[in-house]
Amino acid sequence: MRHDDDFDYTKQAADHLRETGERLGLCIGSGHAHMFVAAALGYGSRKAMQDDPNGPWFGSQWLSREAENVSKIEEAIKRMNKAPVREDQAPMVAEIVRAGLTPACRDCGEHSSQSWPLGYVEAGDNADWVCPRCSSDDAQYGHCRCCGDDVLYLLDELDDQGLCSEHRGEFDLSPEEEEDWDSYIENIQKDG
């Protein structure tokens, strides 16, 4: 599911943190959830994050790569009145925020910081994303032999040699190369 640039992944992450927290028996209010998202991105408050002219870009699908500031989450917990989590839970909060900042899986809707963008995309480009569980479906997804395991493709996007459109024909021989090989094989068989 692709989102346009107006989609706010920080709100999605705050909602994801609240929902996941609820399943874990934690009652995280909206204000605290937004503060944790801002802290994970290195800000002291949501307002500071929103006012920063250099980002973060709320519509970026790649925000999860920037949400690693566990110490800022610990600081936020210390400043909170009746904090919904303990300081030692800051790494867990950071991981939940990272998952929430990642686009939902195109197949099942799951948020996971381990999800893959589909196809060859540069950081900052929009893409469909696939969670680890769905990406392991060998009947639907695969990897290009040249791109390697770092790029996930729909099987329909790979040719019968396991190559993406960028690498299609990579192993095909030119007529001259084919003639050279035929000649070489003929000589080996004749002399062998």
Image (spheres, rainbow, N blue to C red):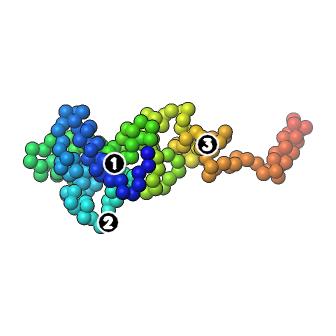
Q: Which residue is tagged 3?
A: 158
Residue 67 in the image: x percent, y percent?
31, 51
* Residue 125 in picture, x, y percent from top left: 46, 56
Q: Is residue 37 visible?
A: yes
Q: Spatial distance from mark 2 to mark 3, Cα to Cα?
A: 38 Å
In this orientation, does residue 62 appear? no
Q: Is residue 142 above or below residue 14?
A: above
Looking at the rendering, which quadrant does residue 20 occupy?
A: top left
Q: Quadrant of the C terminus?
A: top right
Sequence-first disc among 2 and 3: 2
Left or right of residue 77, residue 110 in this image: right
- Give the amino acid at mark 2: Asn
Q: Residue at x 23, y 33 (%)?
A: 24
Numbered disc 1: secondary structure: helix
At label 1, the amino acid type is: Leu
Residue 101: give its label: 1
Residue that carries the numbered disc 2 in the rendered image: 54
Q: Amino acid at mark 3?
A: Leu
Q: Are marks 1 and 2 in contact (CB under 8 Å)?
A: no
